[in-house]
Amino acid sequence: MKYLTYIFRNARRNPIRSLLTIASTCISLFLMMILLAFFDMREDAGKANRVFNRIITMNATGFAGMVPIGRVPEVGRMDGVLATSPFSWFGGKYHDETMPFAQFSVDADSVFKVLDEFHVSESQLADFKANKDGAAIGRRLASDRGLKIGDPLPLKGDLYPVDMDLTVRAIYDGPSNRNLRMCLFHYEYLDEALKKVTMSSASGGSLATDSARTSGNAGMIFIKCKNADIMPSLGRKIDDLYRNSEFPTRTQTEEAFGKMFSDMLGDLQNAIYGIGAAVVVSLLFVASNAMAIAMRERTSEVAILKAIGFSKGRVLFLVLTEAILVAGLGGALGSLGCKAVCDFVDVAKYSAGILPVFFVPWRIALLGLVVSLFVGFASGVVPALLAANSSVINGLRKVG
Amino acid sequence: MCQTSSIVLRSVYKEYRRDEFVIPVLADLDLEVAEGEYLALMGPSGSGKTTLLNLVAGLDQATRGEVIVHGQVLGHLSEAEVTRWRANNVGFIFQTYNLIPVLTAFENVELPLLLTKLSRRKRRENVMTALRIVGLEKREHHYPRQLSGGQEQRVAIARAIVTDPYLLVADEPTGDLDRTTAGEILDLLELLNREFQKSIVMVTHDPLAAARASRVLYLDKGRLVDEVIQETRVSVAS
């Protein structure tokens, strides 16, 4: 503790250099925290789905394949199924917004039985069910866009060749870690619009009939099960039933469904981890260079310290602590600052509906802090060893 | 020497190696410095004055021969031991003061005490005593850049004496000062020698500074070539 004054003053000796080193560490770690937290949150969000006892059926070939809408009631009649709803990602544009929010066409009668963690008032739910152009939107989406009951919600088709002129009929709410930014609207409304397009494209249009973007397609089927125990067998049963059909299915738990997205990002995730490692190495060079310059400027001072009795170990400690302090400060600002920013600013609304919530978990923030301390330590090692082993005589530069 | 010897050099030979060149600096030097003596080392550049000072202060090791300071054979000590020994027994005063610019006068003087187990309060007492001796107790919060050259050297002297070492080594302590300020610094060194019984070994080119010492040794090409014992010291005041 008694050396802290000396260490702090030295760290502040060249404020611009120290600030630049701190800033480079801070910014790099801030960005790293966002990326690491993104992947971490995806895994967490997947695990959080376990408790809802839901399985999802999709075309065996993937999202682009078709799941006929007739299968929704078929699956709904199976043992152990409480409710089913089609789920088709619409991905339309709202006004001039470039970042879409999550939009799904669903069965208005059953969707809140399937997504039973959400609640909506009975009158609004009845209104939503009664109006084909009705939309039920999440509380956060309503608050982000200043939408209220009765407001128009026009969605311009991007993936689909149709536009949806919706009206907000219900605003649902739910646990804060769930997606409160979805827009759910009637499957029938989308299907009717698609029928018109499909019919006109039949005489020369390009819309393929087995595509997920045609009428009669459920996209995915969300299935609410009685309990978790029956989910594996029910999934197998559904897939077995359609195995030899024109559109075989793949059924998996909601958690596995979420993980599938992570797996799709697998290579990207590895690439980002690689970039993160490269950032750490380049940070190391920046901090090492700054520390080496600082120590070169202080050659005679180190010699004085050693002359008046500072041991090698003590000089090593002073230099290393200074390096760790500078990098640690940058790391603390970057990692903890990123956590603070993400705690106070709702970053999830910029994730295009991929993440229901976004925050930097403590373990990621602390990992960032540890990385910055490592950078500080590693950047200080060489200059500290050179200083500790430097010759007092040469440092004083006075040979008579 | 009629008094007890504080520093003894026996057949000390020192050479430096620069690449393939061997440069002899001190040649079989014998020397005794009495307890409480004020010794000045003079001679042309390259004569070995500073090397001799470094050997006595434990900053460097003789290639051959023995350096015994206060009964301690320095050659027998490990690097860590000699560092500890310096911290307890030697105070350093340099031509260019060599204060740490980011520390105040107080903090500069306190530096050697950080190596001790003294409490914060005791450290403060000792630092203020040292600053009082050099007449800078009211400048404790000043940074080196806020002090004059003479005042900086006084802070350096306070740093040298704060651990109460028995030996002060001074390498051209007045080299960067004007005549009047140099006189004040020499007065201070004289005071430390006379009143506080500090042994002082000072390297200087300045005959007026050397005149303050009780003995002056002249070196040339690593050998002692002359010795002057001064019964009556010259003082600026006189």
Image: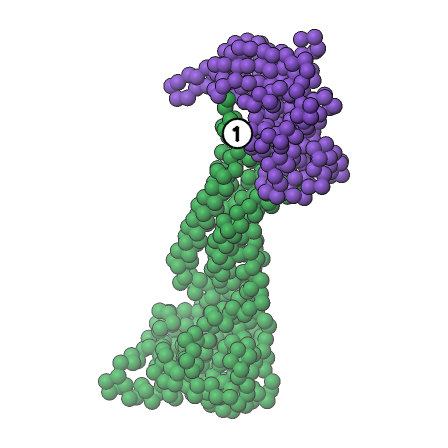
Q: Position of residue A240 (x, y in %)?
A: 41, 70
Image: B162 above or below A43 = above
Camera-nearest residue between A81 and A13 = A13
Colour of chain A as rendered: green
| Residue under the image location 76 percent in, 39 percent down | B121
Instruction: Name the image quarter holding the N terminus of chain B.
Output: top right
Location of mark 1 (residue)? A396
- Quarter-of-image position of residue A309: top right
Camera-nearest residue between A294 and A351 = A294
Camera-nearest residue between B39 and A322 = B39
Left or right, B23 with respect to A65, comes to right
Image: A243 above or below B204 = below
| Residue under the image location 49 percent in, 85 percent down | A135
Image: A114 above or below B228 = below
Q: Position of residue A177 (x, y in %)?
A: 57, 69
Left or right, A136 with respect to B68, comes to left
Q: Chain of mark 1?
A: A
Instruction: Name the image quarter holding the C terminus of chain B.
Output: top right
Helix, strand or loop status at disc 1: helix
Camera-nearest residue between B166 and A350 = B166
Label 1 crowd (10 A; few <14 / some 14-19 / many >=20): some
Left or right, A312 with respect to A28, comes to right
- Quarter-of-image position of residue B29: top right
| Residue under the image location 53 percent in, 50 percent down | A15
Colour of chain B as rendered: purple
Q: Position of residue A42 (x, y in %)?
A: 49, 63
